[in-house]
Image: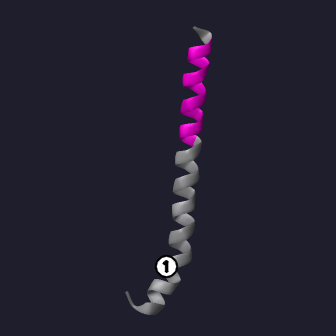
Amino acid sequence: MFYLLDLKYLLSITHKLQVAISSNFNQQTKAMYAPSNALAGT
Protein backbone atom coordinates (compact mmCIF):
# COMPACT_ATOMS: atom_id res chain seq x y z
CA MET A 1 0.00 0.00 0.00
CA PHE A 2 2.72 2.45 0.97
CA TYR A 3 4.69 1.40 -2.09
CA LEU A 4 1.85 2.46 -4.38
CA LEU A 5 1.56 5.80 -2.60
CA ASP A 6 5.30 6.36 -2.94
CA LEU A 7 5.12 5.48 -6.63
CA LYS A 8 2.34 8.00 -7.25
CA TYR A 9 4.27 10.60 -5.26
CA LEU A 10 7.44 9.98 -7.27
CA LEU A 11 5.52 10.12 -10.54
CA SER A 12 3.93 13.44 -9.60
CA ILE A 13 7.33 14.87 -8.65
CA THR A 14 8.96 13.74 -11.90
CA HIS A 15 6.01 15.11 -13.86
CA LYS A 16 6.32 18.50 -12.14
CA LEU A 17 10.06 18.50 -12.81
CA GLN A 18 9.50 17.69 -16.49
CA VAL A 19 6.93 20.48 -16.80
CA ALA A 20 9.23 22.97 -15.08
CA ILE A 21 12.21 21.95 -17.23
CA SER A 22 10.22 22.08 -20.47
CA SER A 23 8.71 25.49 -19.69
CA ASN A 24 12.16 26.82 -18.76
CA PHE A 25 13.55 25.37 -22.00
CA ASN A 26 10.76 27.00 -24.01
CA GLN A 27 11.49 30.37 -22.40
CA GLN A 28 15.19 30.03 -23.22
CA THR A 29 14.53 29.14 -26.86
CA LYS A 30 12.10 32.05 -27.20
CA ALA A 31 14.71 34.39 -25.74
CA MET A 32 17.28 33.02 -28.19
CA TYR A 33 15.04 33.27 -31.25
CA ALA A 34 13.37 36.60 -30.43
CA PRO A 35 16.34 38.78 -31.53
CA SER A 36 16.76 36.90 -34.83
CA ASN A 37 13.03 37.20 -35.51
CA ALA A 38 13.18 40.92 -34.81
CA LEU A 39 16.14 41.27 -37.18
CA ALA A 40 14.36 39.27 -39.87
CA GLY A 41 11.30 41.48 -39.47
CA THR A 42 8.88 38.62 -38.91
Q: Quadrant of the N terminus?
A: top right
Outermost residue, bottom direction? 40
Q: Is residue 40 above or below residue 8?
A: below
Colour treatment of the image:
one colour
Q: Position of residue 3 (x, y in %)?
A: 62, 14
* Position in image of residue 31 (x %, y %): 54, 73
**Looking at the picture, does residue 23 appear above or below residue 39?**
above
In the rendered image, the quadrant that contains the C terminus is: bottom left
Picture quarter containing residue 13? Answer: top right
The magenta-colored residue range is: 3-16
Residue at image coords 54%, 23%: 8
Q: Is residue 41 found left or right of 26 in the rendered image?
A: left
- For image coordinates 54% across by 39% down, the residue present is 15
Name the residue: 50% across, 71% down. 30
Figure label count: 1
Q: Is residue 7 above or below residue 2?
A: below
Task: Residue at 45% x, 87% y: name it.
Answer: 38
Residue at numbered disc 1: 34
Q: Secondary structure at mark 1?
A: helix
Is residue 21 located in the magenta-colored stretch of the structure? no
| Magenta highlight: main SS | helix
Q: Residue furthest top?
A: 1
What residue type is disc 1 on?
Answer: Ala
Left or right of 18, for residue 42: left
Above or below, 32 against 28 in this view is below
Residue 32 x, y percent position in the rendering: 56, 76
Residue 36: percent from left, percent from top: 51, 86
Q: Residues within 10 Å of mark 1 (few under 14, many from 20)?
A: few
Depth check: give the residue in front, 17 or 38: 17
